Image (tube, rainbow, N blue to C red):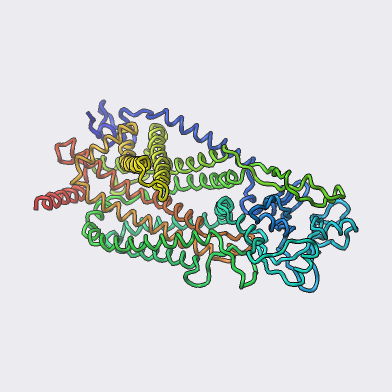
Amino acid sequence: MRGPLGAVIGRYTSSDGSAPNDGIIKHNRKCRDITFLVIFIAFWVSMIVNSSFGFNQGNPLRLTYGLDYEGNVCGSKHRHRDLTQLEIRYWLNPNQVYESGLKDGELKLANARTICLLDCPAPTDDTLNWVCDYPDGEIRLKMNDWIDRNYDYFEFLTPEMRNSSLQLQGPCYPVIFPSVNVYWSCQYIARASNSSLRHWQQMGGVNIQEDMIIDKSIRRSMNSRASVLKRYVADIGKSWPVLIVCGGLVPLFLSIIWLLLIRHFVAAMPWITVVLFNMLLISVTMFYYLKAGWIGNDAVTPIIGEHDPYFHVYGRELTHVRGVAILMTFISVIAILTSIAIIRRILMATSVAAKVIGEVQALIIFPAIPFAMLAIFYMFWLSAALHLFSSGQVVQNNCNNTNCCAYDLVLKKVNCDRCCGYSIRYTPHITIAIFFHLFGCYWATQFFIASSATVIAGSVASYYWAQGEASPEIPFLPVFASMKRLARYNLGSVALGSLIVSFVESVRFILEAIRRRTKVSGTTPDHWFWRMAHYTSRGCLKSVEWTIKSVNRNAYIMIAITGKSFCKSSAIATELIISNILRIGKVNVIGDVILFLGKLCVSLFSALFGFLMLDSHRYRSSHNKVSSPLLPVLACWALGYIVATLFFAVVEMSIDTIILSFCQDSEENQGNAQHAPPLLLETLDSNQEEEVQRLTH
């Protein structure tokens, strides 16, 4: 049976009659859940080791730029070649590109000869332009001179080299087709001039058909799922200033402003929050419509820089933006209708929430501490994530059965042995490392949020059990004392609670993916196995959802108050809530609704500001261009929600801690709370009477 909380935390006289130190009696407190603290420390060591692998093996430039025929990453400096300025990948031989697009073609596009250029070359009608290989061997040109000559040194070639070039084996290759910069790769356009086609046919080039295979081969490669995923991850790396401003500073400022407003204008906050929420939701939806091209002419385009206005290229990114735009439309309609339906209910209970929130008038600054720690962690985690996603070995492909000969300037002859292209090989353990890194981010985030909530709960509990001897406002001394108790006794319990939430969310994600895969159509939808798998996965999802609701912040409150382990504290909190559900129901639910809408307002404003920053020239130019604002905006929304959660926990945990303390106080004193402030006592008692009358009638 539980003992009274007065002997655990409060301003009471100790057993020997002496005054307690710092007004807190540390009764029966000891380190809890030490095993999970050790596991958490081991997890951090593993995160560092895992990240060091990414830093050693990864190169974030691989996510944006391609590889040339030597295995060098465009846009970076290598041991034998400086390609810092040369960011665009160009396929030298159109004949190889065309063959790679044929269904029965032996050559793959990954083995076609590519080099890195400053811009995409263009053909002319009157003369034949050439793009020559990197200067080497007898070609005594510096890289800068080669660039200044538009990559053309055909006039310096020996007769043997010229003959080889005219046979489309290099070292120089004719520029037959126009091309455009699409995600730092030159996309061929199969509409060559008559003069270029005549030269092309004289050199033995294939006949250009109307099916435009020479376009589709490159486009299919750049729109593959792996390429799109790499570009999305690269977008996060390029937009790091946006993440700092819109994912950190903006939500920090807005959260503090919102807390100050709810402190001084509680009665008006439901109206302000609901109206602002709907306006921001509609604004974000409209921005998606703009980027989808359904409003205005600012759609997401894969083309970088100046291009022919009659030439259009559509990528997967535009399809994804349009899908999110449709999803946001449904969410906006449902949210607006729901907010209209509940606004009257919120307004009826505003006075109830206002009285409870009015008891808490400090602790607004404290969340800045976990915010700073979380910001440092995210910067380290993001850098490691970019390196992990780009890790892998650059290896030469196996293309022994393919005829892809090219002139070697060093060997001074046509070489058919080293013409295979290079690719990045990803091993299975890299995938495991990436998933571990993602799980680590979620666990660490939950740990920081739980630690902040526990400190706030301990501070508010000290205020409640002070028997009116404390200041009307919560001073900083209980905050520091609560931080000390957390660091000394309860880190293991917080690590366990955050691990459970992270693990359950991960299982839920996996089960949801399985459920969607088993919900098939067209094969055997009526088969008993698929029906069983479908309903079993749904049942598991319901169980997981129930578990998530059970493991909530009330456990951290009882950890701060009692010093018990996570499981014991969760049981105590659940018992108190069930025993006093009528008394605390309205205040808890309404407070959660207002605070949840407040978090959404902060996160939606962060997303909206992220859209505005990404729409500037900096992120639409060639070097810093993001392929799509989708993932950076989503990251700004998520970071904004996390920051708002840290700061709004001041109000959430204050309300819940006071309510749970009130329930325990009432239980210890036969239903009459002895330590509750009169205003809180009046509010909760009147709330219980209203609920009883409503149920009676």
**Which of the image's four quarters has the N terminus?**
top left
> What residue lies at 32% left-to-right and 57% top-to-bottom?
262
Q: Is residue 216 above or below residue 403?
A: below
Could you tell me residue 563's position as x and y percent?
33, 33
Total labels: the figure holds: 0
Name the residue rendered at 33%, 42% in the picture. 535
Of all residues shown, which one is farthest toward the right?
Answer: 159
Farthest top residue in view: 16
Of 128 and 395, nearer the camera is 128
Q: Left or right? Give the position of 117 relative to 572.
A: right
Residue 618 in which image quadrant: bottom right
Residue 316 shows in the view: yes
Residue name at image x 53 percent, y 34 percent: 46
The answer to which of 195 and 390 lies nearer the viewer is 195
Could you tell me residue 410's position as x and y percent?
Answer: 85, 48
Q: Position of residue 345 (x, y in %)?
A: 23, 59
Q: Residue 424, image x and y in percent?
A: 65, 45
Among the 4 quarters of the image, the one containing residue 481: top left
- For the point 79% across and 74% down, the residue is 126
Front residue of 196 and 587: 196
Left-right relation of 657 to 280 = left
Which sits in the foreground, 213 or 597? 213
- 72 to 87, vertically: above or below: above
Q: Is residue 477 visible?
A: no
